[in-house]
Amino acid sequence: MTNNPPTNTPPVSIDWEKYGHLIKEKTIPAKTILLNEGEISRNGYFIKQGCLRLWFDNKGKDITFQFFFEGEAVSSVESFRSGEPSLFSIESIEPTTVYVISKKSFEQIFVNDPVYVPLLQETMVKRMSHYSRLFMSYIKNTPEERYRELLKNHPHIIKRVPQHYIASYLGITSVSLSRIRNRM
């Protein structure tokens, strides 16, 4: 296996000579939808450069529940694996370059080389851990405490993500977020 991938390939430990042809690089502008809520996810993405967000529509209100940046993998995992409609949309926040892998190619790699299973497991554990922390934060913290936590643990989000998406992620309005920021 190659530990140092060739230029313009995702920085993961993969045999690029064997599987590089299964992964395509794609550059997309900001506000590009990669997956719509209700569609079946047929691709997984690995972010080379840029930012994606996961969001869903709640009675006409856009709810952001996760951001992804360089070096992170993104998909509607449940939909990708089960073929069920996605519960959320995936959208670029800024111009983004991703590596795209189809479900068929993804399965081919994992069937041929189970050595990649721990990488998938690690990604899933990180994602579930994020959801658990987010869930607990909504239950026990005030919006101001959630903002302070975001500022402390993920300042890059504050710097790169528009305020209305941050407010949505925190479960508050943009006006409430402005008030919190003004008090700090």
Image (cartoon, helix red, strand yellow):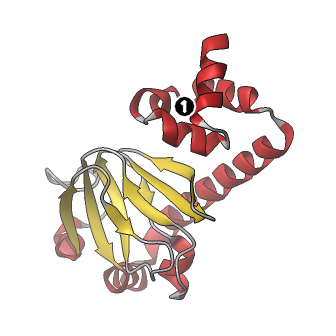
Identify the residue shown where x is 22% and y is 52%. Answer: 29
Answer yes or no: is residue 184 visible.
no
Residue 120 in the image: state x and y as whole percent: 50, 66
Q: Quadrant of the N terminus?
A: bottom left
**Left/right of residue 58 with respect to residue 114 in the rendered view:** right
Whole-percent x and y of residue 51?
37, 46
Query: How many callouts does the rendering have?
Result: 1
Location of residue 114 with respect to 13 vertically, above or below: below
Disc 1 secondary structure class: loop
Give me the residue at 54% from left, 38% from top. Answer: 166
Left of 39 or right of it: where is 154?
Answer: right
The quadrant the C terminus occupies is: top right
- In the image, what residue occupies the spot 55% across and 51% down? 64
Mark 1: few/some/many CA within 10 Å (<14, 14-19, 20+): few
Residue 30: x and y in percent read: 28, 49
Left or right relative to 147: residue 6: left
Q: Picture quarter containing residue 20? A: bottom left
Q: Which residue is mark 1?
A: 154
Looking at the image, residue 174 lies above or below residue 48: above
Q: Is residue 96 placed above or below 38 in the rendered structure?
A: above
Q: Nearer the viewer, residue 156 or 46?
A: 156
**Can residue 169 be spotted in the picture?**
yes
Residue 10, percent from left and from top: 27, 55
Residue that lies at the very extreme toward the left in this rendered image: 7
Indicate left or right for 70 with 79 as reference: left
Q: Amino acid at mark 1?
A: His
